[in-house]
Amino acid sequence: MVPCFNEAAALPGLLERLADMNGRLEAPWAVLFVDDGSMDATFALLEEAARSFPWLRVVRHGRNLGLGAALRTGLANLESPIVCTADADGTCPLEVYPALVKLVEEGADVAIGSPWHPASDPPECGLGRRILSRGASLAYRLATGRALYSWTSIARAYRRAALAQIPFRSDGFDAVAEILLGAVVAGLEIREVPMKLGVRRQGRSKINIAAAIGGHLVLVARAAAQSQRRWWRRFR
């Protein structure tokens, strides 16, 4: 599943990479794009691609609702037992997904492409993204006590039955962390795979930094409160 908003500049390269990846697989993976109310040529490009690639589908929001809403729409339109999520900006390498799917097939409920794993190659992204992503991941790690390195990476594979146990309310970019927090609370099996984070080469980022920071602060506070309640129950 690939949520996207005003990604006409980035789509040709991504579609080429997806076609190359599927051409190398024994059986092509189905790919669902969720156009989150784009105002450029994104939807037209996806419709044209769907006519060329039988493995590609597209659904559309009439207006921009946010990344979390796009993820919920995508999940409602997918039935496969394993669900992968990817960004549209090309910063997450597609080569990591077979390894993520394999972990789920071997028993993990959630598998994460982890740019902040100690074994990952240095990222190409800018300083601002590094600070926000690494800072948020460290905050979640401290709040929950769960030794996961990358909480904000959208490069993931999920067991669909496990994902159904994780309701998430956020419409923004923090929905990715909210899903992982729900998986931790539910006691699901979570694994990480080292992954090099790339840099956007076409188009521009849609993230609202202030809104993202605010959303993460709320979730970190919730995670800390949940951890404290569990600690008190243990010693009562």
Image (tube, helix red, strand yellow):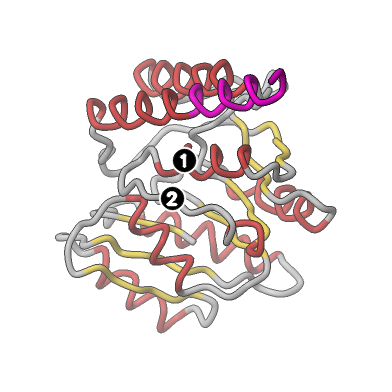
57 inside magenta stretch: no
Residue position marked by numbered label 1 in the rendering: 178
Within-10-Å neighbours for mark 2: few <14, some 14–19, many 20+: some
What whole-number distance in Å separates the C-alpha atoms at marks 2 and 1?
Answer: 6 Å
Residue 82, percent from left and from top = 66, 63
Looking at the rendering, the stretch of residues picked out in magenta corresponds to 223-236
Q: Is residue 59 left or right of residue 166?
A: left
> Which x, y percent locates residue 32?
47, 69
Look at 64% across and 55% down and name the residue there: 158
For label 2, the residue is 168
Question: What secondary structure is found at the residue carrying circle 2?
Answer: loop
Residue name at image x 72 percent, y 55 percent: 101
The single residue placed furthest to the right in the displayed view is 106
| Amino acid bearing label 1 | Glu
With 96 as the anchor, is 189 left or right in this view? right
Q: Mark 2 near mark 1, Cβ–Cβ under 8 Å? A: yes
Q: Where is 152 relative to 110, above or below? A: above
Mark 1 crowd level (few <14, some 14–19, many ≥20, 10 Å Cα): many
The answer to whether 81 appears left or right of 91 in the picture is: right
Location of residue 140 in the rendering, given as x and y in whole percent from the top left corner: 52, 23
Q: Which mark is residue 19?
A: none
Foreground residue among 188 and 153: 188
Position of the C terminus, as image quadrant, is top right
Which residue is pictured at 37% across the width and 50% down the height?
Answer: 169
Q: Amino acid at mark 2?
A: Phe
Give percent across and percent down for residue 60: 29, 71
Compare marks 2 and 1 and give the one earlier in the sequence.
2
Query: 159 or 4, which is in the foreground?
Result: 159
Looking at the image, residue 169 sits to the left or right of residue 231; the answer is: left
Q: Principal SS element in the magenta part?
A: helix
